[in-house]
Amino acid sequence: MERSATPQHGRAAARRLNRRRFVGAAAGAAIAAPALLRAPWSAGAAAELNFTVWNYAVDIVQDNVNRFQELNPGITVQVSDFGWPVFHETMVNRFISKTPTDVSYNGGNWLNEFAAAGWVVPLEDHFDWAAGYQEKVLPFAWQDMTFNGKVYGLPYYADTITFMYNAKVLEDAGISAPPTTWEEVTEQSLQLKEGGMEHPFAYEFANTLPNVSEAFASMVFGRGGELIDEENSPLWTDPESPAAQQLTWLVDAKNEHDILAILDHETTITKAMGTGQHAFTVMYNYNLAALNNAATSPRAGEFALALMPGETHECYGFAKFYNMTQMAVERGPEVIDAVGSFIEYFAGEVDGTYPVAKRWAVEQGLGFGQTALLDDPEVIEAYSAWVDIDLWREQLELARARRQTIWYGIWSETFHPLLGQALAGEIDAAACLQLAADSWNELKASVEG
Amino acid sequence: MGRDGKTARRRDGKTSRESEVVGRASSSLSPHHPMTPSPLRLEGALMAAPVLLLVAIFTIYPVGRAIYQSLRIESPIFPARFVGLKNYQDVIGGLFFKEAAITTLWFAAITVPILVVIGVLTALLLNESFVGNALLRVGMLLPWALPATVAALIWKWIFLDSWGALNAGLYATGLIDNYIPWLTTPSLARMAVIVVFIWTQLPLVAIFLLAALQAIPNELYDAAAIDGAGVAGRFWNVTFPGIRPMLVIVTLYETLMAFTNFDIVYALTQGGPGTATTMVTYFTWVESFKKLDFGKGSALAVLIAIASLALILVLVRAIPKGALVEERT
């Protein structure tokens, strides 16, 4: 359900704040004493926060919010949720229209853009504790939350995009081990195709899906490649580059070998994999938990993780995080303090643990950026139900963030349709790569002058 | 009044009664200097002011703002500046515009004739007396009552490649051996968008044409039958002239609807696969809200407005004289 805030709502909140400030001042000493005894993540002043999320497990989000509010009686949080494919433009609209938004989900792919526009602010400019988390967060997650040397958030979750396969399907087909290179993915797919499986590889793709280019990056990383160099210039213009090779692999897999089924969302893929008609996929790692969840997946237990095919087996690691907005800053110190308390509760250390991040990991299989959870017995026990822990750790160690630019999110809106055209056979891989490079260079020139 | 009981029409086009009224009004409205506002004129201006203000706020300002933006770089991440007609040059010469324009024209050229033909047939069916007619009339309005986005989402579940209802039905009945990728094959995705658009628009077309059909006096059909006209003769000589004004309106309206179709593409295919179903309106949205380039988005919006106006003019001029007005003696 969508519960969007309105400007009227914001003004009403401001009026309530004024009244509360008055009451707070009158009761000064009485409030000050218990406030000093509160934990660091507990707010010292009243505030109403607007929190925007994409609509993943919103019931759990709301429950977490309720728990936070119980611990912080002075703070109320209004949750507004939006679809993942439209989250980017929704947030752009909210920021431009000044729709009250104090704290929001964000990701590395949009951080540079939002930060450059002045819509979100660095945490370390407002909270002394923020920079201290660098030692407690996985490096790729920290990098994904950083822009111009400053950290903008703490992880809602941090995960990898990984290669998954149906072990039983492979075993039934006489394939002894999952593929280790993309050439082997083709070979095994063709073998399965001969055995009657029409499209062995379920590929998540839609023009509007933000993670299409992220999944592509992960596949390129598996080959040991990168998308752009240190000067932010595209590397895929070289036909021998891992990026060019991977894009060509995708196009050939679809149009030459006909082994690719294109599905438009991870939930669709999860259902499709459950039919037993596909053997391989590349998705956010937490989807493996859903595939192996006996309560919802008819083939639970059949799915496994394999290292990302390629020469280095690296993969893309990222963080989705809680970000404070400029609007929150403009509302004043009480709101800033409340946002700080909120982010610390949701992603920071509370009484020596990370309650919300741990809950996501245990209940939903979401990855995490907080290193302390790597050895948490409850997390390990929960993960063991759906993934080989040693292999997962190995892949996690090979994960890395990618270089980000201000225009990456915008460029991906051109790249996705181009890739779609190539997959549909309307242009070839070389044309797709060239047009994607032209678009990149045009945006780079616009931004850098 | 003329001798025939009607008001006499003069050479200047005004009736004698109109001249009389205007003359009286003129003399009473201008007792002083012509530039001096009369109380009546001021009153009229005051009465019209709220409406003019609303028009100015909701029409003139947005249009003016769009034109202004279309001449500038307007983006949260690029420095704002005046660029003249460069946005227009960039969008027309840039990636995807040509494909989007062709797809839009192609879409309108296919859907509108199909809609009109099926609409006429449906209206003729609903105009007949049969058991269940009333239920059918109510039931067929449902697709039109649904928001286009909801309709597109319903159809998405039907067309989905891996577990859509259509593939499941075809497979279960043995008509296909393998699932058909309806939404990921360019030609099939275009067909899917056409089907959904027609499904959502047909009720309105049919109901409008049914209303026109029911306004045709039965005496005309009786007279045609007496003159020996068959089914086809009655259609061409009685039905068609009777519904012609509505056909023109419906064609014009549906052409504009086809040109501005956005919701269905957005919810069903997101313009894909590739750019197979990307139309100009969807392209405008992508430029504005996905690529954050409001200058180019505004340029596209202005181009759509100009194209729509040109289309309306062409269609209105192409309409046979008297087609919109029923001439009665």
Image (spheres, coloured by chain):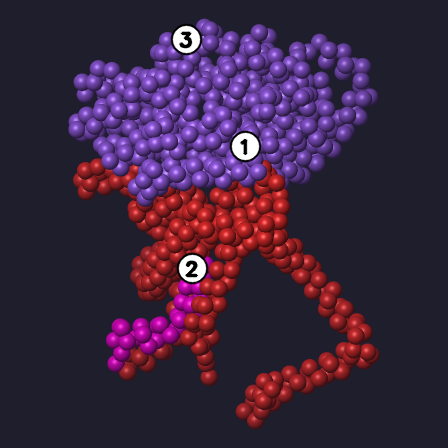
Locate residue A4 relative to residue B128 in the image: left or right: right
- Observer-side mark, 1 or 2, equals 1
Q: Amino acid at mark 2?
A: Glu
Residue A375 is covered by the magenta coloring: no
Question: Which residues make up the magenta segment?
Answer: B228-256
Which shade is chain A? purple
Give the structural element (helix, strand or loop) at label 2.
Answer: helix
Marks 3 and 1, the one that precedes in the sequence: 3
Q: Position of residue B258 (x, y in %)?
A: 42, 55
Residue A310 seen in render: yes
Give the structural element (helix, strand or loop) at label 1.
Answer: loop
The Cα atoms of the two marked residues, 3 and 1, are separated by 40 Å
The outermost residue toward the bottom is: B3
What residue is drawn where x is 35% and y is 61%? B113
Question: Label 2 belongs to which residue?
Answer: B254
Q: Amino acid at mark 1?
A: Ile
Relative height, residue A155 to residue A196 (above, below):
above
Q: Chain of mark 2?
A: B
| Residue B121, quarter of the rendered image | bottom left
Q: Position of residue A164 (x, y in %)?
A: 33, 21
Residue A406: image tag? 1
